[in-house]
């Protein structure tokens, strides 16, 4: 293979696998690293690499793929083989066909996000794999710190449905308060729990020293009287707590006599109002429900290991078998906000547009960007059950999503920051272009050129329009640039032959004539850029369509009223 073709091969592979943009250092490293005989010619090769990369990066991803197939078809065979090796779920410990019951227990105090999705997707996929049951349980018994909101109950159900979940049962913890009371009273009667009325700071001091609270060893009759006072409103918030008896010498002080139920005055819970004053804490309600609902396997973050230690005391006291727990690390995505508190604060301050702001990592935001549910599920399954924390790059998710949307996304021309180009010597011409190059049966779209009207090209391509340069207007004809001014570009018709442009490596640009106004929202880290321009006038797009704006990227159509608004997904 001659040197220039070799450089094109490595540049195209690098660009095609990195959102359409090749990295010069990476390409030079590949060329010289895998072909050591070329190292003595480095001074000659480096400028060649830079020149080829400039040409490669000016091509659309589709054009890069076509060129790559032409000079290195083996790349796609290797990708096909790799795709067939797609990861699947590992066997689940102690799992029996038809007997697996899993649950997902979100707190409806914010929108469902990618971090939550790990436990949810693993729980659902394993339940389906073993022909078992998947339960959605809303953990909404903390109306003070993690206050639930009515909309989030519905949003979470909608998001799970969009992800392709089949929910077998739905339970809401705030509907089950009386059940938790029954179990609390059984524990108190059995001398396994007690009512502590110590000031919180006093209890912490005793706990840290491994000393029993003075109320701990009082008889159940006394404890039951205090319990009734808690229920009757004779104690105020912070004056009494039900605690589970544990090992006072446990190495982790947080496990020692942990709190199970506490008082919240004026809870104003969105579902049950002020019907209850005594509310179960997470570990108590969750442990009771896992048993009551027959959960066999729990998928939870590694940070919940301490909670399991606490909950096992309840299971031991009641003689229950604890579910199989499968711990995994936290999941985060580079440069994307997942924190509910940071999201809420940003929304309140006007920094974010809402819970579906494209910069966020909520499921609603990912959906708005055009990320498909299959891509999210595949990503989570690929990450699997690693116990270590995992940070994924946006490129990981984009690569999976690109493979899914590429066959379904119709192609259109979008010109960002349009600049008029006036072309001399050209006759009226109609370009008939496939909606998708690989699926001609979908039909075509028509772009019409009239000699007295300008075509509009993107300001992004202005470097290509120096006088004396030749460019090809994609699917139209070739032009020679004569003059570039602020008010526009003057060019001359050169010919219609594509092969001439290809042979001379003339750059290819997209264009529109009578375009319709279009804005693309582009998340860039913590910023949300707005690219304004023109979309080809006959583009038949509707809300929720995922399409490819050629040489720009894949987008999801967000609005088609006064103007077309799209949200950028990835290249």
Image: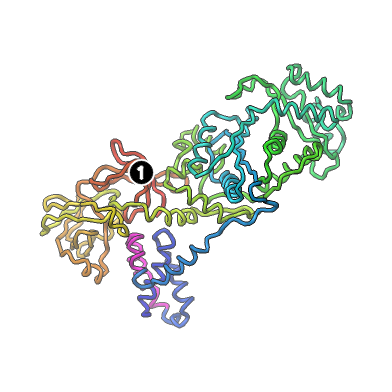
Answer few, some or many: residues within 10 Å of disc 1's Cα (few below 14, many 20 plus, some between 14 and 19).
many
537 to the left or right of 223? left
The percent position of residue 417, horizontal first and vertical second, equals 28, 48
62 to the left or right of 75? left
Q: Does 405 appear in magenta?
A: no
Residue 413 seen in the current view: yes
Q: Which quadrant is the N terminus positioned in?
A: bottom left
Predominant secondary structure, magenta span: helix
Q: Nearer the viewer, residue 134 or 361?
A: 134
Image point 81% across, 26% down: which residue?
195
The percent position of residue 536, horizontal first and vertical second, equals 25, 48
The percent position of residue 548, horizontal first and vertical second, equals 34, 52
Image point 54% across, 40% down: which residue?
112
Image point 46% across, 42% down: which residue?
365
Tag 1 residue: 557
Q: Does 54 appear in magenta?
A: yes
Q: Specify start and end residues of the magenta stretch as a single range.
A: 42-68
Q: Which quadrant is the C terminus positioned in?
A: bottom left
Examine the image and state in which quarter residue 266 appears: top right
User: On screen, 416 above or below 140?
Assistant: below
């Amino acid at each position: 293979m001659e040197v220039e073709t070799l450089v094109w091969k490595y540049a195209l592979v690098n660009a095609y696998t990195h959102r359409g943009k090749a990295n010069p250092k990476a390409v030079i490293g590949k060329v010289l690293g895998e072909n050591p005989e070329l190292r003595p010619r480095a001074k000659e090769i480096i400028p060649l690499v830079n020149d080829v990369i400039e040409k490669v990066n000016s091509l659309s991803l589709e054009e890069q793929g076509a060129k790559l197939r032409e000079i290195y078809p083996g790349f796609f065979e290797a990708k096909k083989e790799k795709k067939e090796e797609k990861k699947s779920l590992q066997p689940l410990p102690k799992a029996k066909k038809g007997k697996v019951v899993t649950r997902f227990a979100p707190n409806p105090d914010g929108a469902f996000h990618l971090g939550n999705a790990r436990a949810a997707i693993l729980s659902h996929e394993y339940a389906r794999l073993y022909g078992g049951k998947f339960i959605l349980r809303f953990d909404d018994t903390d109306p003070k710190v993690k206050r639930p909101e009515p909309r989030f109950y519905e949003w979470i159900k909608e998001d799970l449905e969009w992800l392709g979940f089949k929910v077998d049962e739905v339970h809401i913890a705030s509907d089950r308060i009386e059940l938790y009371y029954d179990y609390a009273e059984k524990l108190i009667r059995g001398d396994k729990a007690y009512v502590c009325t110590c000031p919180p700071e006093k209890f912490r001091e005793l706990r840290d020293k491994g000393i029993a609270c003075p109320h701990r060893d009082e008889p159940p009759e006394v404890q039951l009287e205090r319990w009734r006072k808690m229920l009757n409103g004779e104690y105020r918030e912070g004056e009494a707590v039900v605690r589970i008896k544990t090992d006072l010498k446990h190495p982790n002080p947080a496990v020692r006599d942990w709190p199970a139920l506490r008082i919240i005055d004026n809870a104003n819970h969105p579902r049950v109002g002020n019907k209850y004053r005594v509310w179960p804490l997470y570990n108590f309600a969750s442990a009771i429900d896992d048993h009551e609902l027959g959960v066999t396997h729990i998928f939870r973050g590694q940070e919940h290991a301490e909670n399991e230690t606490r909950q096992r005391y309840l299971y031991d006291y009641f003689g229950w078998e604890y579910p199989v727990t499968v711990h995994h690390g936290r999941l985060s995505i580079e440069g994307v906000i997942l924190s509910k508190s940071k999201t809420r604060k940003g929304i309140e301050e006007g920094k974010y547009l809402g819970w579906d702001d494209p910069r966020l990592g909520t499921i609603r935001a990912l959906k708005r960007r055009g990320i498909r549910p299959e891509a999210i599920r595949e990503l989570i399954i690929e990450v699997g059950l690693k116990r270590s924390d995992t940070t994924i790059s946006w490129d990981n998710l984009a690569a999976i999503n690109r493979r899914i949307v590429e066959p379904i996304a119709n192609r259109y021309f979008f010109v960002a920051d349009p600049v008029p180009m006036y072309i001399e010597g050209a006759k009226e011409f109609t370009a008939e272009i496939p909606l998708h190059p690989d699926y001609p049966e979908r039909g075509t779209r028509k772009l019409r050129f009239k000699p007295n009207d300008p075509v509009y090209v993107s300001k992004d391509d202005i470097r290509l329009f120096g006088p004396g340069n030749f460019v090809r207007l994609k699917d139209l004809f070739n032009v020679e640039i004569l003059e570039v001014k602020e008010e526009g570009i003057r060019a001359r018709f050169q010919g219609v032959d594509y092969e001439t442009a290809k042979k001379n490596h003339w750059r290819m640009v997209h264009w529109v004539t009578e375009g319709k106004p279009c804005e693309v929202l582009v998340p860039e880290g913590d910023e949300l850029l707005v690219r304004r321009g023109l979309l080809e006038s006959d583009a038949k797009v509707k809300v929720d369509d995922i399409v490819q704006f050629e040489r720009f990227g894949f987008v999801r159509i967000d609005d088609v009223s006064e103007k077309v608004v799209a949200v950028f997904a990835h290249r």
